[in-house]
Each structure stands twice: as C-alpha cells, then as structure tokens.
Amino acid sequence: MQALGWSVLAVAVPTALRWAIDRGSEGVPFLTYFPALTLAALFLGWRWAALVALASAMVANRLLRDEPLLLWGSGSEAALAGLFVLSCAGLVWIGEVARRTVRALEAAKARETLLNQELLHRAKNLLTTVNAMAVLTARHSDPEDFVEALTGRMQALERATELLSVDEKVHCDVHALVEAALAPFRAGDNFTVEGPPCELPRDACVPLSLALHELATNAHKYGALSVPEGRVALLWTIGEGEGALLRLAWREEGGPAVVKPERVGMGTALLKQQRGLDQVELKYLPGGVECAISVAGVVC
C-alpha cells in the first residue's frame, strides 16, 4: 500500500505542477513527469515505475492536451508517443540500475561490518582458547612432555579452525571435522567411522575437535591405538526435527586393560560438558574407553 501511495503521488504532483504552469499548452506536456518517474524507479523499483509511466501517459494525454494523442494518428504524433515510451524506458532502466547499485553497496557495507565483527570475535575466542590450553597443559604435564602435548593440541585447534570459513556459513561438516581430528592417528583400518552427513553449529566445532584429539591421543598412548590389534569405532546418529541432537559414540577395543587414571589432567577439562558440547560421558571400562558426546542444533 505504501508503494501504491507513492506511485499515486508520482503521477499527481507532476500533473498538478504542469497544470499550474500552463495546463500543458506550451511545449511537451510530459516533461514534468520524467523526474518523478526516475525517483519512482530508484525508490520503488522498475515495476512500480512502469505503472507510473503508464498512468502519467494516460493522465497527461487526456488532461494536458487539447486533443488526445493517438498511436495510429499522424506520423508526428506516433513519433512523439514513441519518444515518450523510449524516454520512460531509459529513465526506468537508469533508476533500476542505480537502485541495484545502491543496494549492492549497502549489502557490501553490511557484510564488511559483519565480517569485521566475526573476525574480532574469533580472534578473541582463539586467544582465550590458546591461553587456557597453554596454562592447563603446563599445569598437568611433565616438563619434558609439555612441548609435545601443547603442539598436538595446537595442531588440533588449527585443523578445527580451518573448517570454519569467514562468511555467512556458521557451521562445519561433522565428517570433515572427524577426519581432520583423527588423521594423525590413522593407520590402516584402526578406525571405523560411520554416521549420516550433517553440519555442526560453530560453537561446537572447536570443542569437539579438541575432544576427539584428546581421546585419540590417550588411545595412542595408553589405550586401543597403543597396540597393533587395537581398534576404535566412532559412530554418530542424528535425532529428528529442527535443531536436531547429534549423539557421537567413541568405543575402543582390542587394547590393553583400562585403568581409570588417578591424576586429573587437561584431558578432563576437554572431555566434559561445556559450551558447544551439551553432554559428555566418559567411561573407563576394562575392555576399553567409551565416550558419548551430544551436540544440539545440528543441521542436516
């Protein structure tokens, strides 16, 4: 309704102006409509501008001419009508191009602002994560193991971060994340990875990648991956509905007997409920470590 009202004004104002000047008796009666037509194309779009052009032609032809202009009349009248149509088409095209250009510039500016905010947000989160990893690794690692432990976790963080692109997309593919996290520990068929395709919310990508890295590291040092016959099954399922819940199960078998560690290390901090990981349940069973992780808000 608002666009219709402006379209009516785009016809009424130039008509009233021309009527007040000379009632169309001097010169071409359509001239006052051209600025309004351009503004209609710029602010309302080409469809409304075309309607304004048609209404303007009808009103001016009937009200501002002694004798209405006929397309099938004399050659001069047909030429005048053709020039009016061409002029209107040109003005509508110019207004539409300017309208799209302005919109594109506004969208680019909004996107630039969003990207700057996103980069700042990610930089702060990344620095916080790196600082926490360094502090906790130093606190819970022997001095001779500090560099190796921190390097592994930093590499896992790097792989998880690479999965997040700086654009409208704010999810990461679960299969790509799992493969990236397990790649350093793969050897032959020591992993079984199965699950439906889906995308994780951004907040879950880094915590899940670090959790999988921690599980794989522990399995490599003490669990199923420490012996040739050891195997790890990593399976996940997706619940139904919008904002579905991903349930991921880590299960080790074929490794040495598992003993629950007495020392609480940084792995405990990574393998617990936190932002992005809605539920984490870690079990040290005699046959092998099992871990169940739930992530809400996945997109399939």
Image (spheres, rainbow, N blue to C red):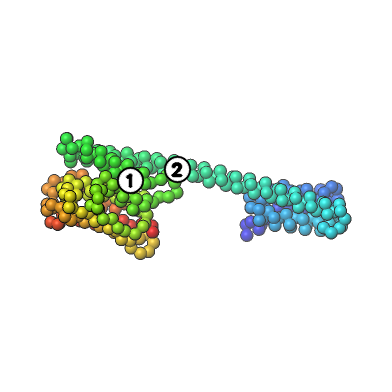
Q: Kindly identify which residue carries mark 1.
A: 160
Q: Residue at x 33, y 63 (%)?
A: 239
What label sits on residue 149 in the rendered view?
none
Q: Is residue 252 left or right of residue 29?
A: left
Point out the tag, 2 or 1, that comes first from the N-terminus: 2
Vertical side of 130 occupied by 260: above or below: below
Q: Position of residue 124 (x, y in %)?
A: 35, 40
Element type at mark 1: helix
Q: Position of residue 194 (x, y in %)?
A: 30, 58
For the C terminus, the image quarter is bottom left
The crowd level at tag 1 (other Cα within 10 Å; few <14, some 14-19, many 20+) is: many
Q: Kindly identify which residue carries mark 2.
A: 115
Element type at mark 2: helix
Q: Residue at x 33, y 45 (%)?
A: 160
Judged by depth in the image, the label closer to the viewer, 2 or 1, is 1
How far apart are the alpha carbons under marks 2 and 1? 19 Å
Type of amino acid under label 2:
Leu
Vertical side of 293 occupied by 137: above or below: above
Q: Position of residue 84 (x, y in %)?
A: 77, 51
Q: Is residue 282 visible?
A: no
Q: Nearer the viewer, residue 154 or 204?
A: 154
For the N terminus, the image quarter is bottom right
